[in-house]
Image (cartoon, rainbow, N blue to C red):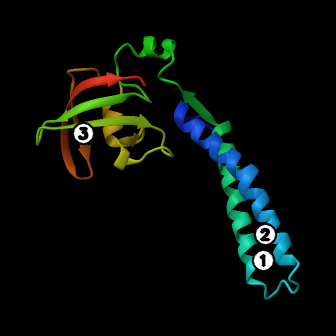
Amino acid sequence: MHKIPLTASGAEQLRSELERLKRVERPRIIEAIAEARSHGDLKENAEYHAAREQQGFIEGRIKDIETKLSNAHIVDVTDEHTRTLANGKVIFGATVEVLELDGDQEQTFRIVGDDEADSTRGLISISSPIARSLIGKQVDDLVAVETPGGLREFEILGVRYE
C-alpha cells in the first residue's frame, strides 16, 4: 500500500481518537455487553444486539485508524528542514492566503490529507482541484482552477507553514 499524506496535527488527532476508543469506548462496550448478557435470553435482547453492533463499529474504526497511521507519511510544515525545502512554495500542509479574482474575495486554505479535509474550516484535500493547482506555486502567482462550479482564478497573497 502506498503512503498517505497526513499533517502532523491530523496524525495527532487520529492518535487521540485511537487512544479514546481503546481506553474509554472499548471497555464501556465490553461492560455493556456483559450487562446485557446478564439479562438472559440473547435472541430477544435489544440491548445486547445494540451493544454488539456498536462494538463492531468501534473495532472497525480502531482498525481503520491503525491502518491509516501505519501507512501515513506525516508532514510537519513547522519543521525547519521542511520549510527550507519548501522555500516559500505551496506544499502539503501549508496555509495559503489567496484573492479570488472574480469577486475580489480573500480566502485562506490549508492543504491537508483527504481524511482531514473540512471546507467549512478552510481545510482542503490535497486531491481537490484547488489544492492540486496551488501546489508548487508561490506568492504573487496567478492560478486558474477548473472546479465543478466552473473556472476560478486566484492570486496567491501569502504562504505560511504553521
Q: What residue did someone put label 1 on?
A: 48
| Residue type at numbered disc 2 | Ala
Q: Nearer the viewer, mark 1 or mark 2?
A: 2
Other-residue count near label 2 (Cα within 10 Å), few / some / many at <14 / 14–19 / ≥20: some
Q: What residue did someone put label 3 on?
A: 145
Residue 28, how many percent across, how many down?
76, 61
Towards the viewer: 48 or 110? 48
Q: Nearer the viewer, mark 2 or mark 3?
A: 2
Quadrant containing the C terminus is top left
Towards the viewer: 150 or 108? 108
Residue 37, how many percent across, how many down?
86, 77
Task: Report which quarter residue 155 is drawn in.
Answer: top left
User: At 40% from the left edge and 27% from the top edge, which residue is drawn?
Assistant: 94
User: At 20% from the left edge and 49% from the top edge, which residue is drawn?
Assistant: 150
User: At 48% from the left edge and 20% from the top edge, which residue is drawn?
Assistant: 78
Q: Residue 32 carries which label?
A: 2
| Residue type at numbered disc 1 | Tyr
Question: What distance separates the C-alpha of mark 2 from that of mark 3?
Answer: 51 Å
Where 22 sits versus 101, above or below? below
Residue 54, how many percent across, how many down?
69, 67
